[in-house]
Image (cartoon, grey):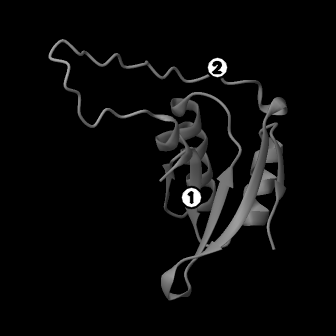
Amino acid sequence: MSKKEKNKKDVVYSTNPDFKFEYEEENDAETPEPNQQQLKVYLDRLGGGKMLSRVNGFIGKTEDLEALGKMLKQKCGVGGTVKDGEILIQGDHRDKIVDLLVKAGYKAKKAGG
């Protein structure tokens, strides 16, 4: 269960026939300037020994995150995805990703072991 799902309150059952659940609209926060973003690049291992570079710490609109993910995938020449507020890039490309993010004006560093 992600952090976003933990914060939602779901109604399982109500005996009130007039009950109407009011949904709160989730608005993406405005995307700050790249020099105000502090991104961290991790290396994860998937099943079968496959490597995965993960970028997290992005604050802002989903569209901006997807655009950044697309740029990183193109520059690294590999596949990947944007999921749950993180950019996932196939393979160990941490050094290249950090260089690309720094050139784009982001504060980025390698994290983890």
In the image, 59 versus 20, the foreground residue is 20
In the displayed structure, does residue 16 sit left or right of residue 63?
A: left
In the displayed structure, does residue 102 sit left or right of residue 70?
A: right
Number of labels in the image equals 2
In the image, 49 versus 79, the foreground residue is 49
**Residue at the far top in the pictured view:** 18
Which residue has dot 2 on it?
Answer: 30
Few, some or many residues within 10 Å of mark 2 (<14, 14–19, 20+): few
Q: Is residue 35 above or below residue 23?
A: below
Q: Position of residue 12 (x, y in %)?
A: 27, 37
Query: Could you tell me which residue is drawn at 57 percent across and 28 percent down?
Result: 61
**Residue at the far bottom in the pictured view:** 48
**Residue at the far left in the pictured view:** 17
Amino acid type shown at disc 2: Glu
Q: Is residue 70 above or below residue 59?
A: below
Q: Secondary structure at mark 1?
A: strand
Amino acid type shown at disc 1: Leu
Q: Quadrant of residue 91?
A: bottom right
Which callout, 1 or 2, points at the residue further toward the start of the chain? 2
Q: Quadrant of residue 94?
A: bottom right
Which residue has dot 1 on it?
Answer: 88
Q: Position of residue 83 (x, y in %)?
A: 49, 50
In which quadrant is the C terminus drawn? bottom right
